[in-house]
């Protein structure tokens, strides 16, 4: 039997252009697999004058120019009819992007204010439960039912998730098939937006975290969007030798 760790970095030409608790209701790209990554030097995205803080308004933290949701979703493939768990949905930026792309969304967050805002927006937009469910989670509980979603999107820094092993095991139980999971985190480099430096983790360390919690196939994209990198992880069936 083979149980190898795969970490793949897409070719340069592409990168320069991706418990048993019952949760409550309202209160998803191909890649190239290669040998394990050994280099640890972080890559800094090319400078983009349009993203300079001096050229942005006070709404920079919510500005689509750096979030580039369409670029993230493009890596997830055709989302029509797919159920995506938007874990740590926050202000709902990716939730609305996922809905626009045709996905059914489970928007989950551990902040009551975020959940209240999402619920109000859902009501105002007239979105039904068969398209969007919004849930309040707590530390260590992603509140997913078994095999409830086709894929997960995580946009919170992995370093801030407590008891990652237990949390990810619950996430994996809530996903169908090969447990496709997308992680978007900030590079450990200065940027005009983002979390404190102490919360940032380089992409090799983040890949190690995902390997430690059971993912066996991991791809890294580190020059696709400004200031951040994207990890795609899954657990494909083990092939016999």
Image (cartoon, rainbow, N blue to C red):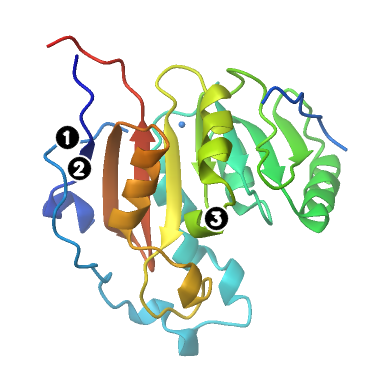
Residue wearing tag 3: 156
x then y, percent, for residue 56: 52, 82
Report the front residue among 195 and 12: 195
> Is residue 116 something that shows in the picture?
yes
Q: Is label 3 in a helix, a strand or a loop?
A: loop
Residue 174 circle label: none
Q: Residues within 10 Å of mark 1 (few under 14, many from 20)?
A: some
x then y, percent, for residue 112: 82, 53
**Left or right: 104 as drawn, with respect to 115:** left
The quadrant holding residue 126 is top right
CA distance separating discs 3 and 1: 25 Å
**Left or right: 162 as drawn, with respect to 209:** right
Q: Earlier in the sequence, mark 2 or mark 3?
A: 2
Q: Quadrant of the N terminus?
A: top left
Q: How many marks?
A: 3
Q: Residue farthest to the top?
A: 240
**Left or right: 212 as drawn, with respect to 239:** right
> Is residue 82 something that shows in the picture?
no
Above or below for 118 versus 46:
above
CA distance separating discs 1 and 2: 5 Å
Mark 1 in CB contact with mark 2 (< 8 angstroms): yes
Report the front residue among 22 and 60: 22
Residue wearing tag 1: 33
x then y, percent, for residue 37: 16, 49
Tell me what residue is drawn at x 48 percent, y 29 percent.
79
Above or below for 172 versus 42:
above
Report the front residue among 104 and 203: 203
Residue 8 circle label: 2
Q: Residues within 10 Å of mark 2 (few under 14, many from 20)?
A: many
Above or below for 130 versus 121:
above
Q: Earlier in the sequence, mark 3 or mark 1?
A: 1
């Amino acid at each position: 039997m083979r149980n190898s760790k795969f970490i793949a970095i897409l070719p340069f030409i592409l990168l320069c252009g991706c418990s048993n608790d019952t949760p409550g209701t309202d209160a998803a790209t191909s890649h190239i697999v290669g040998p394990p990554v050994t280099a640890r030097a972080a890559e800094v995205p090319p400078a983009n004058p349009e993203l300079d803080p001096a050229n942005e308004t006070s709404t920079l933290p919510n500005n689509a120019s750096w979030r580039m949701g369409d670029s993230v979703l493009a890596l997830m493939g055709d989302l029509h009819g797919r159920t995506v768990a938007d874990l740590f949905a926050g202000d709902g930026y990716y939730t609305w992007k996922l809905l626009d792309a045709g996905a059914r969304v489970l928007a989950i967050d551990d902040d009551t204010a975020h959940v209240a805002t999402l619920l109000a927006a859902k009501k105002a937009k007239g979105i039904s439960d068969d398209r969007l469910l919004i849930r309040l989670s707590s530390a260590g509980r992603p509140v997913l039912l078994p095999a409830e979603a086709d894929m997960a999107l995580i946009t919170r820094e992995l370093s801030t998730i407590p008891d990652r092993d237990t949390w990810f095991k619950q996430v994996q139980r809530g996903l169908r098939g090969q447990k496709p999971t997308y992680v978007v985190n900030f590079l450990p480099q200065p940027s005009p937006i983002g979390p404190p430096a102490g919360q940032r983790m380089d992409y090799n360390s983040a890949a190690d975290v995902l390997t430690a919690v059971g993912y066996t196939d991991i791809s890294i994209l580190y020059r696709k969007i400004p200031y951040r990198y994207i990890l795609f992880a899954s657990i494909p069936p083990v092939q016999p030798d």
